[in-house]
């Protein structure tokens, strides 16, 4: 698929001590998944932080909300490390995007 415009930069919300390098990593991974969107991406919100339940072995949480030409796409993940949570959220976002064409 040839993309005419790149997906917009996500609005990033950070809760807790997340380093700048981690934020950039999450932006890159989210953007890579959104490159495969079947229609133009109008809006992206990325929420990064710590899981609400402490001591569960999965302290990091990542959530992505995207508007793909009016279709709301959500993907979220928690994991023991920040990069694992981002990678899992990216895979889930990719799966949601691959099913997006069938929903309309």
Image (cartoon, rainbow, N blue to C red):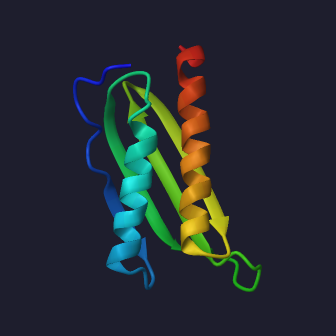
The residue drawn where x is 32% and y is 26% is 40
Q: Position of residue 3 (x, y in %)?
A: 29, 24
Q: Furthest-left residue in view? A: 5
Q: Is residue 30 above or below residue 100?
A: below
The residue drawn where x is 45% and y is 62% is 47
Q: How many marks?
A: 0
Q: Position of residue 68 (x, y in %)?
A: 40, 30
The residue drawn where x is 43% and y is 85% is 17
Q: Dividing the image into 4 quarters, which one contains the N terminus?
A: top left
Q: Nearer the viewer, residue 101 or 81?
A: 81
Q: Furthest-right residue in view? A: 56
Q: Nearer the viewer, residue 91 or 56?
A: 91
Q: Position of residue 52 (x, y in %)?
A: 63, 76
The residue drawn where x is 41% and y is 57% is 46
Q: Nearer the viewer, residue 20 or 63?
A: 20
Q: Is residue 21 visible?
A: yes
Q: Is residue 50 visible?
A: no
Q: Decide if residue 53 is on the left or right side of residue 37.
A: right
Q: Position of residue 2 (x, y in %)?
A: 31, 20
- Examine the image and state in which quarter residue 102 appears: top right
Q: Is residue 57 above or below residue 2?
A: below
Q: Is residue 58 above or below residue 103?
A: below
Q: Decide if residue 26 is on the left or right side of residue 94.
A: left
């Amino acid at each position: 698929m040839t993309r005419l415009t790149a997906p917009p930069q996500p609005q990033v919300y950070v809760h807790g001590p997340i380093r700048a390098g981690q934020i950039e990593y999450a932006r890159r991974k989210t953007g890579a998944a959104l490159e495969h969107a079947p229609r133009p991406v109008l809006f992206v919100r990325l929420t990064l932080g710590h899981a609400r339940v402490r001591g569960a072995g999965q302290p990091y949480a990542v959530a992505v909300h995207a508007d793909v030409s009016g279709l709301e796409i959500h993907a979220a993940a928690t994991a023991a490390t920040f990069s694992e949570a981002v990678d899992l959220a990216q895979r889930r976002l990719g799966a949601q995007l691959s099913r997006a064409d069938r929903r309309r």
